[in-house]
Amino acid sequence: MLRYELRQATPADMELVQELKFLGLRPYVEKLWGWDSDDQQKRFRASFVPDRQQIICYQNEDVGMLHVEEREDAVVLAGIYVAARHRSKGLGSAVIRDVLVFAERCGKPVRLRVLRPNPARELYWGCLSFVDASTLWMEGVHDAEITSPVPAGAPA
């Protein structure tokens, strides 16, 4: 089992989080809309709230970012980004499994949105038991909401 730690993000993490997010999203954003660096930087700066994000630390190094929000009806996985050199080693899956455990303790499903071109969609659906919660895939719809099963005994 991979051992990692989470620490609260701070304003000093802005550059790290931006780099992780841009490297993670750029290929999919480019496919869907094209990449405008100035626009993306403005959007990032307007939405960066360190209090809502945690830094994933692995082997004494900051290697990722996690953004989870607990809502009344679900735990929302608003973002997870892992540095390229640490991908495909099970770290992201380990973090998501821990989010699923947290949500189960809360009696809530986990929800997230994923861009259609992102191959991680298959990981969420296949290996991590998420299901497509979108009513249908429509022309022009660029993302899907997917959700974990509602934990047994949770209110309907």
Image: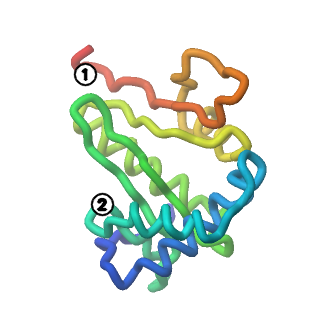
In percent of the image, x 62 and y 17: which residue is there? 136
Numbered disc 1: secondary structure: loop
**Pointer 2 residue:** 52
Q: Which x, y percent locates residue 111?
A: 43, 35
Residue annotated with mark 1: 154
Q: Residues within 10 Å of mark 1 (few under 14, many from 20)?
A: few
Q: Viewed as shown, does residue 120 lie left or right of 50?
A: right
Residue positioned 55% across, 26% down in the render = 131
Q: Nearer the viewer, mark 1 or mark 2?
A: 2
Residue at screen point 49% across, 57% down: 80
Q: Is 76 left or right of 123, judged from the image as shown?
A: left
Q: Residue at x 29, y 71 (%)?
A: 8
Q: Nearer the viewer, residue 117 or 84?
A: 117
What's the image's color scheme? rainbow
Q: Is residue 132 above or below residue 32?
A: above
Image spot of residue 74 (x, y percent): 31, 33
What amino acid is at disc 2?
A: Arg
